[in-house]
Image (tube, rainbow, N blue to C red):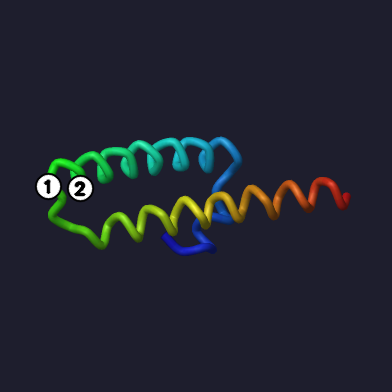
Amino acid sequence: MKIDDVRSLSQDQLTEELVKLRKEQFNLRFQKATGQLEKTSRVRVVRRDIAKINTVFGERTAAKKKA
């Protein structure tokens, strides 16, 4: 997911995507703990996508406070 794609989403869509990614992150952690994780790189991608969404939330909050 690219940052431009994240910025184009609405607030509700961002929230839904964040919930989906957090569930996936939980499942990946669970798979890692049980030794079933095959694509270890997916953990990093999911973590970064969550960070991108949180960044956009912060940008929007800062813009609202400034306006």
- Kind of element beneath mark 2: helix
Res. 22 mark: none
Q: Is residue 31 left or right of residue 47?
A: left
Residue type at numbered disc 2:
Lys
The spot of residue 16 in percent (x, y) is 47, 36
- Residue annotated with mark 2: 32
The spot of residue 15 in percent (x, y) is 53, 37
- Residue annotated with mark 1: 35
The spot of residue 55 in percent (x, y) is 60, 55
Query: In front: 14, or 37?
Result: 37
Query: In front: 31, or 66?
Result: 31
Which residue occupies 30% across, 55% down?
A: 43
Circle 1 Cα neighbour tier, 10 Å, few/some/many (<14 / 14–19 / ≥20): few
Which residue occupies 77% across, 52% down?
A: 62
Q: Are marks 2 and 1 in contact (CB under 8 Å)?
A: yes
Gap between marks 2 and 1 measured at Cα:
5 Å
Q: Is residue 10 left or right of residue 34?
A: right
Check the image and name the residue furthest to the front: 33
**Res 40 quadrant in image:** bottom left
Circle 2 Cα neighbour tier, 10 Å, few/some/many (<14 / 14–19 / ≥20): some
Q: Is residue 61 left or right of residue 66?
A: left
- Kind of element beneath mark 1: loop
